[in-house]
């Protein structure tokens, strides 16, 4: 057990947790956003991030500090917390990004991790190799070896109470991501950044982000806090949390503000394209687009950065609340409908339904069926698996409409898309008490038929009849042979 | 032409407009939210609504004022604007709600409208009959007659510069709603509340709300500003705006606050159920749930009302921005995925695709395909209708993958789900430059096949070949007989 990380609530692979950062003497609630602080340019001061925005943790770059003479000296002398004036936890990056960008850097894991320790970092980072997407398996494997060597080097450094990151690489090769996750989890290191995701996010490859992260998670353990390195746009927090990410970092709030870009959970807008400020944050209730545009550059950048932070932190809170309620997949779906590529990511997430199901909790609020994708949720899968274990008497009617007035069946079970059959006594339990729309897509009926097939397989001696509501051909075709089907829709009127 | 209402931008049936209220000397941008002011209990003062929340218009009840002795006197003496201390436009209701609730009231249209004029109302209301949903056609028609008599009575009152509401009733009978709309539009009255919608909204019958409103709109003219009377929850503004509503009124912000209910665009939460405040508004950035719960009753009610107003006004601005961008249907879809019954409403909205198409604009930003419902959008319908008018040479390949290297076709057109075929020269124009996800549902291919059918019908002399990407059977079946189909998916690799 990693005792720095405690799970408080789960929803599929998502979790609300507490990351204890001993060197900072603080506990950080996750999912958490770590604002990125450029030690040379502070759009919003760390003190203000803490007091006004509630930031419990931030991330800065030890490599830049080490290379910048006066910062180097001040950091060693005062320590990072005093230099940045931030009372929460401080994570430091190592220069891996610069290594990937420029091909070489003049440090190594042992040295830079020691430096991170010496300047008072709370969570340090070795020099891993952020292998980009789509490279050959051979290159990804070779570079992963170097990352794993860096983790071994890190384990040798005397880091005291400082936690240490164990980055998980492997490019877009899922086998390598899983292997890298398992390797990292087997070290004594503490926090697990899934690395080199930024090129995927920049290309809107949310489906690949989901697959790569799910692969890494298969290798990692439940007690591993996972950081989706470089992911800071609020439009993807729900999706990333749903695949098990606990930490995000945002440079976007400041970088975008510099370019007059305005973050929303639905995507990014250019300030010049806005006729209204579609947000209730303090910046957007104090201004309109014209008054923002009229500010001088420095003031406008600060105001936009404050807006960007407000929506970003609010989305983190919304994700946490959804996990507590067990409604995260519904939030993911809403966000997914904002962009075609987010919709691809949502579908990829549901392709991992088995992995989601394995860590899903048993009871939540109410299951909302909101689209055909709802038929692929882990709750539906779990019900189908359970049907395999239920026993039935000799003759059973599975009915969408309760029992007919006169009948000779030994039992009448309920039949409810997308779940399928269940004894009436379970009608009020999660997820079978789901709220459905009046109109369902074929996918919901096909899923119900799959449920029938699962029950039939477990009870070959029983004679089943399916009493349905004018099912489409695709669903009727999915009912196993030998099961009688009857359109009972008249009973529903 | 009603010169009090000017359209500035449209998106389907939705519009951004300017309602000029001559008696108040103000112009109100629509869609607009009118906070409901109970003259006896003010949770948030009208002055604060104006200055802090940007309310340009509010609504209060002249019947209550008339019945409350001191208010009656003060209103006649000072006038509503001074009494309420509100510099924007003031709408007054007539007591119709009380009539529906208690069976009778001691006033009539002539008297109460005169009173509204005398106290300085800017938009007055006759005593219409809010017929509930699902009553017999006969009762709905009979009560509609009485409403129409009230409109005639209203036209007789000397109301000077005051605008007058012409409520549109008719219960859930679509023919009556349409007739009522046409009758109201033919009067000289000014603003058009669609009435008795609240019972539908309370029962989450969003599909019926959409159908009833669409029917009323078929009778009304484009220059009629439409008020969805009693609709104030931000979760349905996008859907209601999409079916052509311009004005909303909210008592919810205050009533819900009294019961510790917290509005969001995804639904309503109980304060006690919140572990986090999932919102960036000033209330939610200054508090956490515990600090809100610790406030005394009056302070907590005020803080929650402020939050409720902030999210409500922000959603109005988001809807306006989406209309300007031409992305309202995408916002409607996102909101629709928050609740099964909203999803029903969204489907009902797309059932009105022809009506949406008739007032849709030609060019917008980028069409985002985000779910199978996208295949039913008015832009797809419009393209199919246009295909009917395009001429083709003797042999044409409709190809999802451009032209093969060697071919003898007279022309090669593009084929793009969900639109169908078009000449390559149109590839970059709206909506054919749509962004698609990597994975499409059958509905998108079937819609493309419908497009093929439309083009084939207009050009019976042409020999068409469909070069597709491994289409599902449902789409291949929708291709007209005599058209050859060829799986060209290899070209796409």
Image: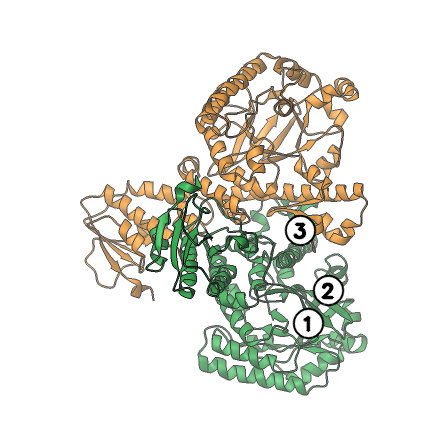
Chain colours: A green, B orange
Q: Is residue B428 among what the camera can see?
A: no
List the residue tagged with mark 2.
A56
Discs 3, 1: same chain: no
Q: Nearer the viewer, residue A273 or A438?
A: A438
Q: Nearer the viewer, residue A432 or B301?
A: A432
Q: Secondary structure at mark 3?
A: loop
Q: Is residue A351 above or below residue B429?
A: below
Discs 3, 2: same chain: no
Q: Residues within 10 Å of mark 1 (few under 14, many from 20)?
A: many
Q: Secondary structure at mark 2?
A: loop
List the residue tagged with mark 1.
A5
Q: Position of residue B146 (x, y in %)?
A: 54, 17
Q: How many marks?
A: 3
Q: Is residue B273 left or right of residue B331?
A: right
Q: Position of residue A296 (x, y in %)?
A: 68, 51
In the rendered structure, the residue with mark 1 lies on which chain? A
Mark sitting earlier along the chain (1/2): 1
Q: Is residue A241 above or below residue B231?
A: below
Q: Position of residue B157 (x, y in %)?
A: 61, 13
Mark 3 vs mark 1, foreground winner is 1
Q: For the point 50% across and 84% down, which residue is it?
A: A142
Work out how far the residue at label 1 is from the one at label 2, CA to CA, in angstroms: 15 Å
Is disc 3 in contact with disc 1, using a CB cutoff of under 8 Å?
no
Q: Is residue A188 above or below residue B273?
A: below
List the residue tagged with mark 3.
B279
Q: Nearer the viewer, residue B442 or A203?
A: B442
Is disc 3 in contact with disc 2, using a CB cutoff of under 8 Å?
no
């Amino acid at each position: 057990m990693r005792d720095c990380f405690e799970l408080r609530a789960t929803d599929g692979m998502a979790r609300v947790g507490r990351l204890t950062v001993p060197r900072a003497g603080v506990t950080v609630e996750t999912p958490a956003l770590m604002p990125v602080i450029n030690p040379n340019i502070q759009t919003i001061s760390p003190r203000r991030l803490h007091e006004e925005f509630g930031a419990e943790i931030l991330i800065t770059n030890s490599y830049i500090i080490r290379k910048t003479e006066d910062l180097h000296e001040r950091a060693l002398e005062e320590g990072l917390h005093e230099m940045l004036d931030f009372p929460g936890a401080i994570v430091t990056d190592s220069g891996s990004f610069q290594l990937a960008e420029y091909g070489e850097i003049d440090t190594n894991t042992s040295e830079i991790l020691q430096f991170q320790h010496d300047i008072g970092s709370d969570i340090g980072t070795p020099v891993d190799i952020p292998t980009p997407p789509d490279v050959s398996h051979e290159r990804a494997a070779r570079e992963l070896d170097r990352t794993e060597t860096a983790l071994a080097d890190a384990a040798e450094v005397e880091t005291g109470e400082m936690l240490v990151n164990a980055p998980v690489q492997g490019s877009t090769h899922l086998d390598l991501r899983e292997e890298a996750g398992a390797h990292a989890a087997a070290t004594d290191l503490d926090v697990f950044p899934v690395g080199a995701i930024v090129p995927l996010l920049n290309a809107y490859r949310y489906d690949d982000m989901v697959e790569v992260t799910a692969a890494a998670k298969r290798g990692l353990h439940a007690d591993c806090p996972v950081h989706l390195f470089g992911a800071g746009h609020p439009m993807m927090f729900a999706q990333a949390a749903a695949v098990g990410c606990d930490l995000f970092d945002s440079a976007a709030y400041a970088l975008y503000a510099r370019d007059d870009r305005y973050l929303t959970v639905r995507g990014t807008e250019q300030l010049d394209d806005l006729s209204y400020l579609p947000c209730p944050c303090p910046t957007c209730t104090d201004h309109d687009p014209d008054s923002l545009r009229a500010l001088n550059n420095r003031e406008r950048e600060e105001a936009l950065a404050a807006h960007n932070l407000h929506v970003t932190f609010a989305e983190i809170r919304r994700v946490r609340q959804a996990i507590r309620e067990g409604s995260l997949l519904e939030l993911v779906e809403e966000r997914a409908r904002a962009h075609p590529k987010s919709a691809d990511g949502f579908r990829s997430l549901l392709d991992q339904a088995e992995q989601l199901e394995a860590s899903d909790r048993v009871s939540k609020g109410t299951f909302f069926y909101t689209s055909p994708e709802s038929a692929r949720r882990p709750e539906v899968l779990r019900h189908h698996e359970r049907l395999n274990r239920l026993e039935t008497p000799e003759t059973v009617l599975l009915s969408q409409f309760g029992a007919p007035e006169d009948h000779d069946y030994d039992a009448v079970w309920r039949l409810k898309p997308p779940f399928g059959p269940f004894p009436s006594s379970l009608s009020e339990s999660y997820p079978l008490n789901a709220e459905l729309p009046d109109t369902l897509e074929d996918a919901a009926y096909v899923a119900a038929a799959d449920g029938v097939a699962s029950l039939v397989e477990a009870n070959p001696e029983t004679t089943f009849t399916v009493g349905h509501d004018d099912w489409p051909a695709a669903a009727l075709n999915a009912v196993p042979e030998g099961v009688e089907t009857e359109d009972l829709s008249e009973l529903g009127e």
